[in-house]
Amino acid sequence: MATAGKRGALTPSQLTRVGDRSSFVYLERCVIHREDNAITAEDGEGVRHIPSATIGVLLLGPGTRVTHQAMSLLGDSGTGVVWVGEHGVRYYSGGRALTRSSTLVEAQAKAWANMRTRLNVAREMYLTRFPGEDVEGRNRRELLGLEGDRVKECYRKQAARTGVEWRGRKFTPGDFAAGDPPNQAVTAAAQCFYGIAQSVVAALGCTPGLGFVHSGHEQSFVLDVADLYKVEVAIPVAFDVVAESDEDVGARTRRALRDRVHERGLLDRCVADIKRLLLPRGADVEETDRVGLQTDRGPDIESGRNLGVIW
């Protein structure tokens, strides 16, 4: 059996950077299999070949079946896999980290474990969302109030810009159809962003449960990351879609969001933002598949050899 340091998978240098990948690919009513280093999607119209290493996250819609070989390839490629319902996105699986390094997750845990640094990261997240705001010295209650006001203002501005009637944010978990078209579009955009954010978090090797704004949920950090782009991208796309038509809002929002994410290079920005938030200025992630041993003093030492009692 191969050890963690000798896995027969692609090396980090052989994999496509997450920032250079397609944001997501949506498939439905087909059988997904593997052929060489590509996944195949077969339906009544034929077979399509999709290079797995170029996908950020694969959305599997209703009527899809996926083989073990396909999932193995997607995992080795660091591709996130999301099973999608008729009207929304839920994250159920994911690939291994592309970095093969624990640098980011260790930095995340260190920043999260200290209340002062945890609040500092939360302030930086709010500053990323609302550039120019004064977050110095703000406590969490003040940050939450700032966010609430700014998001409500964004809804009002987008409604005025597009001419879409907005009656306030109303969302019933598990009942997508209960919302009016604008709320359906906002929900669909937000849920797509959760899938995209989860794929980036997983690809970078971070822990989804250690959030700096959200707390107590297995996807807290994913929610933090997804919210960074809510006001800038998700909400405007949702209102644009509804302004065009009230029909098939969920699917049209997904397609419009995919195009906007690609146009803005958002995957690359997402990677850069996570690194900026968690790592010291100027630091980067070492792309390695090396396993070391911790010591009480100095740097880690190389694993794979017997050190004996004295070394």
Image: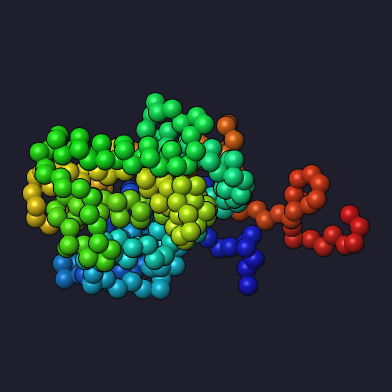
Colouring method of the image: rainbow
**Rendered position, 249 above or below 236:** below
The mark total stands at 0
User: Residue 17: image x %, image y %?
Assistant: 44, 45
Residue 185 left/right relative to 247? right
Quadrant of the image occupied by residue 229: top left
Quadrant in which the N terminus is drawn: bottom right
Q: Compared to 202, does 146 lie above or below?
A: above
Give 184 or 260, whichever is nearer the viewer: 184
Q: Residue at coordinates 91% horizontally, 57% vertically from top-left?
A: 310
Query: Residue at point 17% right, 63% down?
Result: 177
The picture quadrant where one finds residue 282 is top right
* Image coords of residue 311 (percent x, y): 89, 54
Residue 19 screen position, x and y as percent: 41, 43
Name the foreground residue: 88 vs 65: 88
Residue 188 is at least partly visible in this image: no
Drawn side of residue 172 relative to residue 5, left or right: left
Where, by quadrant of the figure, is residue 308 drawn?
bottom right
**Relative to the observer, which residue lies in front, 70 or 199?**
199
Residue 110 visible? The answer is yes
Q: Residue at x 29, y 40 (%)?
A: 151
- Image spot of residue 49 (x, y percent): 29, 60
x 41%, y 65%: residue: 93
